[in-house]
Image (spheres, rainbow, N blue to C red):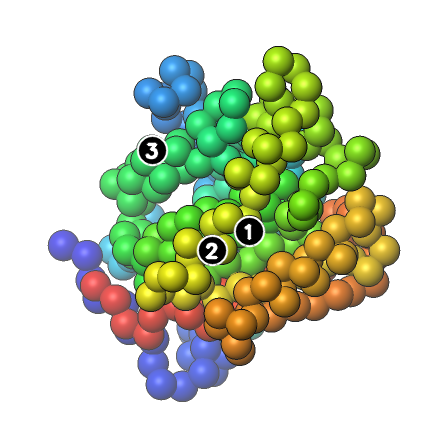
Amino acid sequence: MHRCRRWPAVPFAVFLAGVVLAGGTAAAGEIVHRSFDSEVLGREYRYSVYFPDDYEADEVRYPVLYLLHGASGNESSWPGGGNVRATVDRLVAAGEIPPLLVVMPGHSNGWWVDGHDVPAATVIREELLPHVDSTLRTIPHREGRFIGGLSAGGYGAVNLALDHPYLFAAAAALSPAVYTPLPPERSGSRRNPQFARDGVFDPDTWRRLNYPLRLERYATGRLRVPFFLLTGRNDELGITAHTQTLFHRLWPHQPGAVELRIVDGGHDWSVWRAALPDALRYLCRFVPREWP
């Protein structure tokens, strides 16, 4: 039986500082590479997981963040380029966020949607989430589940959260490739089979899969997903303006529950590594104080 975890009324920093002092050293997590057999894809599906310190020694459940990579990335992108382990270790040790699991799936060129090539969103929803909840000690419901991503992964996080607000308590999109109405010629999406018909980019497919249509459906529902949006002001793919557009489209439906930051930098890991701590702090504001 899993023990109940309850965060005390004192701030995380005060509580965890006592834990660190009592133990003598700061907690350190671990990243493990895993996989499962995907029936949807007919092949192995790989992912990486950040485990908090003492995961194997305790019996409590943890909130889980699904962190999506960019278009050409894989399950090692966030652990490597994003410096996930050191960042989460530092924030947990400082008491700025609670211990959590971070699941980083690998699905290169899938753009996290059900396009013409592969049903990437279906794999996330129908296979990865149930697999993780059944094999790891997660909080297996919306209140303990979060999603984020960068570039194409930011596009995926936005679309998955809007399509399935009952699955995620909050979302973070860093430099999200949410081009509207269409991506620029230099965007890799124009050469991706997910958005192509007969080998040629199909504007209708892009419009069908992008967030504006999903936002229309989302706006008619009851649930709202708080969003953290961040982009570099000198993004060479023109994503800055599109992220601002997304913010202004979300705001009327959830004023105060969407945050936009425009920072120095372009479309690269220097922006995303620096943004990850603030994204984690934002998401973890919605972690429940008590769970079974």
Residue 224 picture quarter: bottom left
Q: How far apart are marks 2 and 3 (CA)?
A: 26 Å
Q: Where residue 171 sits: x, y (%)? A: 50, 58
Check the image and report above or below for 216 versus 227.
above
Q: Name the residue under label 2.
A: 216
Q: How far apart are marks 2 and 1 (CA)?
A: 6 Å
Contact, mark 2 vs mark 1 (Cβ under 8 Å): yes
Q: Name the residue under label 1.
A: 212
Q: Where residue 230 sits: x, y (%)? A: 68, 61
What amino acid does circle 1 point to?
Pro
Label 2 vs label 3, nearer the camera: 2
Label 1 vs label 3, nearer the camera: 1
Name the residue at 80% across, 44% down.
237
Question: Seen in the image, is 143 located left or right of residue 214?
Answer: left
Q: What element carries label 2?
A: helix
Q: Where residue 285 sits: x, y (%)? A: 46, 72
Q: Where residue 287 sits: x, y (%)? A: 39, 68
Whether residue 181 is visible, yes or no, is yes
- Locate the N terminus and report the quarter of the image it occupies: bottom left
Question: Seen in the image, is 279 located left or right of residue 181?
Answer: left
Residue 127 tag number: 3
What amino acid does circle 3 point to?
Glu
Q: Is mark 1 on a helix, strand or loop?
A: helix
Q: Distance between the residues labelled 1 and 3?
A: 26 Å
Whether residue 33 is visible, yes or no, is no
Tag 3: Cα neighbours inside 10 Å, few (<14), some, or many (≥20)? some
Foreground: 142 or 18? 142
What amino acid does circle 2 point to?
Glu
